[in-house]
Image (tube, rainbow, N blue to C red):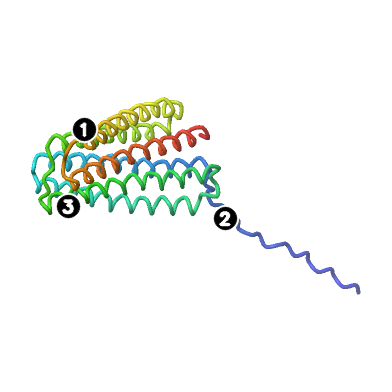
Amino acid sequence: MGMSPLPCSRPTPVLMLTFPVETEASIRRRILDICRDQTRNVVEITRELALMTDSVGDGKGKDAKDHYQNMVKILDDFEGTKKKLLEEVASFGALLSNREDFIRLIFRVGEVADYAQGIGYRLTAVIDRSWKVDKRYTKRLSELIGLVLEEMSKIRETMMSLGFNPTKAMELSKGVEETERKVDTAYRSLDLEVLDEKIPLRTLLLIRDLSAHMENMADLGVDVVDLIRVIALTA
């Protein structure tokens, strides 16, 4: 008798699990959302700094310190958001065609916040040491930081537009540059004025240092908006 053939064994079906794959567009949207949070924080930091500068000029030391503490709280949130943003870029950045632009944007915005904190710290020294600064100079500093706040608000508007209307973002970015030029003019005018006056050296150095930091914030704002333009072009 011939042996009956063995039954053909069929391969065991393999259960294939499918996972949603994130696209570059979805990753980009999420990172842009966090970038918007960062620019909103920068506006709030600058607003508290402007209020602090006003309070110092009015001789309201307690109010000035309260505004500085508010700044510090927002800066803590800022650092947390920055860390989250860097983690997002590190995890999914390989899928982004302009990963380096986002990294530069993160650090530029961070530098703006650092300068703001430096100004706030110096203003607390004015209060703690009871340094006397002529009111006309504190008024000029208030005007200068007010222009910087205006610039930061326009940066936030530009960033808000980036996700849904890159063309609109490009248009809004021009307003940032216009405000930065106003900051530059105000800074140069104040700098020449204090150099031309016979005032104590400490006051001279303080006013020049504070105004230079404010002007640096404005310069960095232009760097930020330049990076927003680059990202808009790749949208």
Q: CA distance from mark 3 to mark 1?
A: 20 Å
Q: Residue beneath label 3, please?
A: 125
Secondary structure under tag 1 reads: helix
> Residue 112 has which mark?
none
User: Which residue appears at 35% of the width and 26% of the height?
Assistant: 178
In this view, the residue in front, 145 or 110, is: 145
Q: Residue at x 60, y 58 (%)?
A: 15
Task: Give whichever of discs 3 and 1 has the lower sequence position.
Answer: 3
State left or right for residue 148 relative to residue 163. Answer: left
Which of 198/58 is in front? Answer: 198
Circle 3 SS class: helix
Percent coordinates x, y for residue 123 in the rendering:
18, 48
Q: Position of residue 97 (x, y in %)?
A: 55, 42
The residue located at (10%, 47%) in the rendering is 61
Amino acid type indicated by mark 1: Glu
Q: Earlier in the sequence, mark 1 or mark 2?
A: 2
The disc placed on residue 143 is 1
- Label 2: element kind: loop
| 86 on left or right of 124 | right
Mark 1–mark 2 distance (CA, rounded to whole Å): 61 Å
Q: Residues within 10 Å of mark 3 (few under 14, many from 20)?
A: few
Which of 14 and 205 lies nearest the eye of the viewer?
205
- Would you place residue 132 above or below residue 91 in this image? above
* Image vertical order of residue 174 relative to residue 142, above or below: above
Q: Residue furthest right?
A: 1
Question: Which numbered dot is residue 17?
Answer: 2
Crowd band around label 2 with a 10 angstrom C-alpha radius: few (<14), some (14–19), many (20+)? few
Circle 3 or circle 2, nearest the eye: 3
